[in-house]
Amino acid sequence: MKVVLGKRGVKRLLDRHLWVWRGDVAAMPQKAGIYPVYGERGLLAWALVNPASLISVRVFHFGHSEDPLAQLWRNLENAWELRRRYYSAHPEGGVRLVHAEGDLLPGLVVDSYARHLVLQAHAAAWEPLLPELARRLQDLSGAKSVIARHDSPLRLKEGLPRYVRVLSGEAAETAVLREGEVRYRVALLTGQKTGAFLDQRDNRLLLAKYAHGKNYQRALDVFAYQGLFALQLASRLQEVEVVDSSAEALRAAADNAALNNVENVSFNQANAFELLRQREREGEKYDVIVLDPPALAARKSDRERAAAAYKEINLRALKLLKRGGLLASASCSHHLPEEDFYRILAAAAADSHRLLRVLERRGQGWDHPTLLTVPETRYLKFALLEVVE
Ligand SMILES: C[S@@+](CC[C@H](N)C(=O)[O-])C[C@H]1O[C@@H](n2cnc3c(N)ncnc32)[C@H](O)[C@@H]1O
């Protein structure tokens, strides 16, 4: 049984992308699984295949393989090898052990929270492999537990059932982590994503460094979730306000503030768009503003509307910042290329009559590796900007 690609599908793989859309496949087996992929001239690759998914072919190995399943497990060992040192050195840390296509393990993410692993498999071919995957992850890392957080709606697109299940070990409901000087609790079974946004870990630590030793007083952490940017700032500034629309996120943020014994953080359940406008009307001023919205362009067709929304929040934030202040602005939309994000920031700067110095132009942390020819693997944009005037 094999997959045969049409012309466009062959071109995709020759260009070293890993995905082939269903419409670019000429023939494929009717059952999800691991299959060889052929073009007119012969074998091209091995892939996780699902005829029910829009992305029907997800390559994990180019060329011939005697034992494709062994190759998939080798990819897992390579992913572990990249993180092994960090994992050993940070027993209370958070680190992404598997970053899907970036690790040639398509559709699979595995995050480690103080040695509790939380995984999400969004490609159907992983489903029968989950018990062995959990065993291998524990053997490699010596983790305390492996949990499948399969409650995302993305699973439905693959025709997969939704559930949350402990795959192995002694799972806990929460784990307490350390990030620099900050401690925080992760809800392993119910938190957003797999529990935390590890992709911003290094950017949070970086912002703390920039805020160190400055005479900054007031900060606003907008779209804050469990308040991790705010907590990095709390020991360095006089007051920090956490803003999120989710009551659950704010409860987690308050819990984390208590865990760190900080009393200069306030919590505000609000729609960020309205709050920023209101603060501008009231003439409020801040030294540091963080904007870390959810993916505003979830689909390609959302791009224009999302661009307007990104511009709106950045424009408002720039009007609220004092001279010399910092704007940490992020976008995690796959469908918004980095150049477009910076073009939007520049337009917001022009409209608010501010001159901005780019202190840092970053993306997701090193443990979320990207593939040069698969732009979707580089989704996070993070700009740290100083208001010159
Ligand atoms: C990418 S997460 C933030 C992650 C966080 N900065 C961190 O480092 O852990 C986006 C957050 O925005 C919140 N959110 C979504 N829409 C919102 C809105 N209109 N106003 C305020 N918060 C919103 C979500 O509840 C979520 O917690």
Image: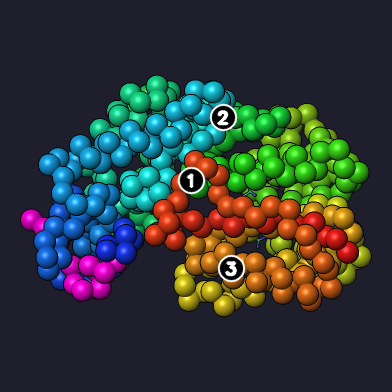
Is the residue marked by circle 2 packed among few (<14), some (14-19), or many (20+) residues within 10 Å? Answer: many
Return the x and y of residue 331 as percentages of the image width and height.
60, 60
Ligand 1 contact, mark 2 (Cβ < 8 Å)? no
Image location (x, y in percent) of residue 163: 36, 45
Quarter of the C terminus within the rendering: bottom right
- Regarding mark 3 in the picture, which secondary structure is present there? helix
The residue depicted at 86 percent of the width and 38 percent of the height is: 213
**Number of the label disc, if any, that sits on residue 140:** none
Q: Which mark is residue 339?
A: 3
* Disc 1 versus disc 2: nearer the observer: 1
Q: CA distance from mark 3 to mark 1?
A: 20 Å
**Does label 3 or label 1 sit earlier along the sequence?**
3
Whether residue 3 appears in magenta in the rendering, the answer is yes
User: Residue 93 lies in what quarter of the image?
Assistant: top right
| Residue 64 in view in this figure | yes
List the residue tagged with mark 1: 368
109 lies left or right of 58:
right
C-alpha span from label 1 to label 2? 15 Å
The amino acid type of the residue labelled 1 equals His
Of circles 3 and 1, the one toward us is 3
Query: Observer-nearest residue: 206 or 253?
Result: 206
What stretch of residues is rendered in magenta?
1-12
Dot 2 corresponds to which residue? Answer: 93
Q: Quadrant of ligand 1?
A: bottom right
Q: Residue at x 44, y 28 (%)?
A: 84
Compare marks 1 and 2 and give the one earlier in the sequence: 2
| Label 2 element class | loop
Of the residues shown, which amino acid type is indicated by label 3? Glu
